[in-house]
Amino acid sequence: MLTISRSKKKLVSAAIWAVGVFVCLLTVRGQFTASSGFELPLYLFCCAAGAVAVLFCCVELPEHLTKNFAFSTVIALVSAVPIFTMMEAIASNTLKELYTISILFNFLVIWLLVWLVLSVSRRFCFALRSVAVLCYILAVANDMVQEFRGQPISALDLYSLRTAASVADRYVYSFGSGFWTGTMLLLLVWAFSGFAKGRLRGVKTSCINLTVCLVCQAAFWGSFYKTSMLEKLGISDYLWNQKLAFQDNGVLLSLFYSTRYLMIDVPKGYSADRADQLLTDASDSYVQTVTDQRPNIIAVMNESFADLDLVGDLNASEDPLAYYHSLAGSENTITGDLLVSTFGGGTCNTEFEFLSGCSMAFFPAGSVVYQQYITSELPNLTTTLTDQGYTAFAVHPFYAYCWNRDEVYPLLGFDYFLDINNFEGARTMGGYMGNSVCDESDYEKLFELYEAKEPDERLFIFNVTMQNHGGYSQISGCDENVTLDGYSKQYTSAENYLSLVRESDKQLETLLEYFSQVDEPTIVVFFGDHQPNLSDEFYNELYGIPEEERTLSQIQNKYKTPFLIWANYDIGSEQLGTISANYLSTLVLEKAGLEMPEFNQFLSQLYKQVPAVNLNGYQTPDGIDHSFEEETDVTELLREYQTIQYNLMFGKADRVESGFTIAG
C-alpha cells in the first residue's frame, strides 16, 4: 500500500529532512556518552526514528485510506505511544520504572488533548501535530527546570516565569541524549501525522462531536480534580519526592497532577471564630518576657548557604564553614539546623516562612506565595517590629522585581527597599562570571545603613544575599578552590560551590566582628535559604544511596541549612537541633525581649511539640520524621496551626487582626 510519492516537492522536502537528520545526529553523537560509555542502543534508536520519519515523508498511502475518519482515528490512537515516549525520553525516565496504570493514564490524557484540538480545528493532522509540539515544549521545560533547580516543573511555575528569565543566563542547558531522542521522536510523530488526513465534515457532525467531547472532558477532569480516582487506582503524587513521582507516573500525568494544587482548600472545621479562640488560648497560656533592650535586628538570609555534611560525609580538602562551626557553643550565640521547604531554588518561600511564621506545608505543592497570594497588607515580623518603633529596610543586591519583591515588600511593611540599583560599583563574585554582588560588598551596605541611622533609632534590616546563586559550572572571584576527595569523578560545580560558601563563611566573621564593636545592643540572625542545586550524581555519592531508596528522614536532610542567632550582649548560649524556618522569627523576638502577637505566642508553644515542619512532613520532639499522611499525637495541633494560618492568609474581612498584631 505504501508507494513512493510522485510529488517532486515532497521528495525534495524528504531529501532535506534526510540531510538535516543525518547532520544533526552526526554532530550530536558526543551527547550520547554517559558515565557507562557511549549509549549505542539509544543512538541507534534515534537513527532509526529519524530514518522512519524521513521514509514517512517520501511515501504515500492511498487517498481513500488517509482521508478515512476511522483510519485517522487509529493513527491518533497509535501516536500516543511515541508522544508519551518522547516526553519520558527527554526526562531521562526509564519506561520500565513507570507504573502500568500511569502509562495508560498518560495515553488517555494525550487522547483527550488530541480530541479537544480536533473538535476545534476539525483536522486530525493539525490536532496531532499541535499536541505533539505542546508535549515536546512541556517536556523540555521540565527537563530545564529539573536541571537548573533540581526539582521537576509544576503548574505553579508559570507564576515564576519572569524571575526564571532574569537568571536563565546563569545556566547552560546540556542538550543531552534524552533531548535528542525526544526530538527525533517529535519528527517521527510529525511525519506519521501526515497520514491522518481525515477531518470532521459538516456543521451538524462537528457540533455533535464537540458536544460529546466537552461532556467526556468534563466527566474525566471532574473526576480527576474532585474525586480520589487516582489514589484508588494506586497512583500517588509523592509531595515529599517529586522526582520519584515523575519517574513513576510520567511527565504529562505528573504535570496535570500538579494542577490539582492550584487552589487552597479551606481547613476542615475552619471558622474565623475558631482561629480567634485558638489565638486567645495561646495567649492565655503564654507568659511574655518583655525587656526595654530593643536591640537592632540584622537578619541575613544567605543565598544557598548550606552545610553539605548534613547530607553525608563531604570529605572536602578543608571545612568550607570553619568559622560558622567554631561558633557552636560560643557565648551569646544560638546555632542549629534550619529545616526549609525548598531545595535548589525558591528563595522567596524561605524568606516568607521566616518573616510570616507561616509554613509552606499548608500551601499547594510548588506554590510561590509572593507571586500568588500576597495581594494586600500582611502582618509579619516586619510589622511587629515597626509597630514597636523600628525602621525596616529590605536589602537585596539583585533586580527588585524578582519574586515580585518590589510589590510584596511594601505590603509586608518595609519602609525602604534597596536593590541592585543601590550597589553601583560593588565587587562581584560567583557563578556567572562573577556577575553577583559579593557578600563583602553586600555587608558593607548594611554597615552604611547602621552608621547613617539616628542615635535613638532602632533598625530592622532583612538582607537577602546573592553571591552563591547558581549555576556553578564556572565561577570567578575565589582565590583557591575547595576540592573533594574520594569520589568516582571530579565534581567541578560542587567544588566551585564550596569555594563560594567558604568565602561567605569568611564574610560572616566580618559581619559579626563589625557588630561586636558597636555600642548599641544588636542581634544578628543568619541562615541559608536552601541547599544548592548540584547534580543528582553528586548527591547520590554524598548520600551513598540513590534517591528512590531514601527514607523521609534522609530526604529531609536535603532541606536543611545552618542558622545562628548572635548578639553583642547576653542572650545565652545554646546548640539547638532542628528548627524550621517558620519558628525562627519567633525565636528572635523571644531572645530580643520584644512584645509578640498572639500568633507568635502560639508558634512558641507549638515549637515545643512540633519542632520542625515543612512541605514534606514534620518532626516530633523525639527526633522522628513523619509524613502528613500519618496520624500522630500532634496531628490535631498541626490542624490548629493550619486554621490560624488560613485565617491570616485568606481570612480577608474575617481575619483576626488582634491575633497577628500588637497593641499600640
Image (cartoon, rainbow, N blue to C red):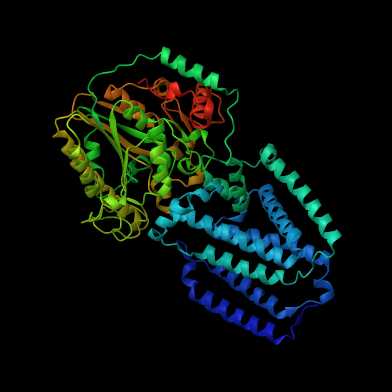
Q: Residue at x 32, y 56 (%)?
A: 431
Q: Residue at x 24, y 38 (%)?
A: 324
Is residue 637 in sight in this rendering?
yes
Q: Can you tell which quarter of the image residue 137 is in? A: bottom right
Q: Residue at x 17, y 29 (%)?
A: 520
Q: Residue at x 75, y 44 (%)?
A: 219
Q: Can you tell which quarter of the image residue 88 is in? A: bottom right
Is residue 651 in sight in this rendering?
no
Using the image, determine if residue 94 lies above or below residue 370: below
Which residue extends farthest top? 284
Horizontal arrangement in the rendering, residue 109 relative to residue 537 (left or right): right
Horizontal arrangement in the rendering, residue 297 relative to residue 188 (left or right): left
Which residue occupies the foreground of this view, 158 or 556? 158
Using the image, determine if residue 608 lies above or below residue 100: above
Quarter of the picture containing the C terminus is top left
Query: Residue 394, how many percent across, how many down?
Result: 32, 41
Horizontal arrangement in the rendering, residue 381 relative to residue 508 (left or right): right
Horizontal arrangement in the rendering, residue 639 relative to residue 515 (left or right): right
Which residue occupies the foreground of this view, 382 or 329? 382
Query: Residue 449, how many percent across, how many down?
Result: 22, 41
